[in-house]
Image (tube, coloured by chain):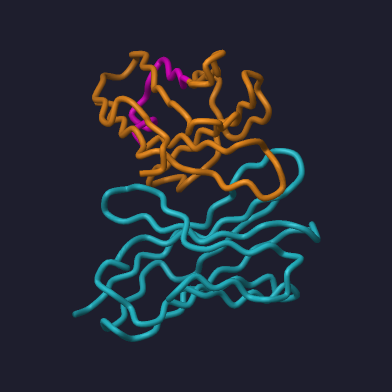
Amino acid sequence: AQTVTQSQPEMSVQEAETVTLSCTYDTSESDYYLFWYKQPPSRQMILVIRQEAYKQQNATENRFSVNFQKAAKSFSLKISDSQLGDAAMYFCAYRSPQGAQKLVFGQGTRLTINP
Amino acid sequence: DSGVTQTPKHLITATGQRVTLRCSPRSGDLSVYWYQQSLDQGLQFLIQYYNGEERAKGNILERFSAQQFPDLHSELNLSSLELGDSALYFCASSVVPGTYDEQYFGPGTRLTVT
């Protein structure tokens, strides 16, 4: 079974600075999908960014980018120019393209933005 | 707004009771997923339905059941409730369980068992 690990329960960053959230996963599959979800205090789950394992190019969405290291099974999220609205829980998630299309989530990282 | 609706938003009930959580997927989405978010277990997958049929089961207790109706809305039934069932229950939907379909999450139903 696939597992996802986020080793940083909490992180903080100054407004306008850059922060990187870590995620590692374990799988025997060669093809899969990885996601970062944001959960603000409203509790809504919001997709931030996604990466297909077969793509070597790292995904980027505005201020959000990932560092995908397939061999190391690492999938970190970089947030540039941090804004107060980025404060939230961030979850890394894995999804297999086969069988149950369920998302397997990490434990989450609580990100605080200091003004 | 993801387009996925869940009712009710909050539910407070007593141990031993039974509740039903409802989910309406985005227009056009055929697949519905249920997830549970609790302090103990984190976010975990419960069950998936596709076009009315059960497609996959995760860590869903026998006291829990679900179904997807012909209009594609889904209901999660929780019975013989225990204190440990207190959690946020999410529904998510996607077009089809394909290779790259995104799962859109509803706002969740917060269940408190007292």
Which hue belongs to chain A?
cyan
B113 within the magenta span: no
Question: Is B77 within the magenta?
Answer: yes
Q: Which residues are magenta?
A: B75-87
Q: Nearer the viewer, residue B2 or B37?
A: B2
As drawn, which residue projects farthest toward the left?
A: A115
Residue at x-position 45% and y-position 42% = B105
Above or below, comparing residue B99 to residue B65 in the picture: below
Residue at the image point whose x is 69% and y is 38% from the top: A100
Q: Position of residue A19 (x, y in %)?
A: 41, 81
Pinpoint residue B67: horizontal percent, then vertical percent: 55, 17
Q: Residue at x 35, y 82 (%)?
A: A81
Quarter of the rendering containing residue A88: bottom left
Expressed as whole percent of the image width and height from the top left, the position of residue B34 reads 51, 33
User: Which of the 4 image quadrants contains residue B1?
Assistant: top left
Q: Which chain is orange?
A: B
Residue B97 vs residue A91: left or right? Answer: right
- B12 vs A68, left or right, is left
Q: Residue furthest front?
A: B28
Screen quadrant of the C terminus of chain B: top left
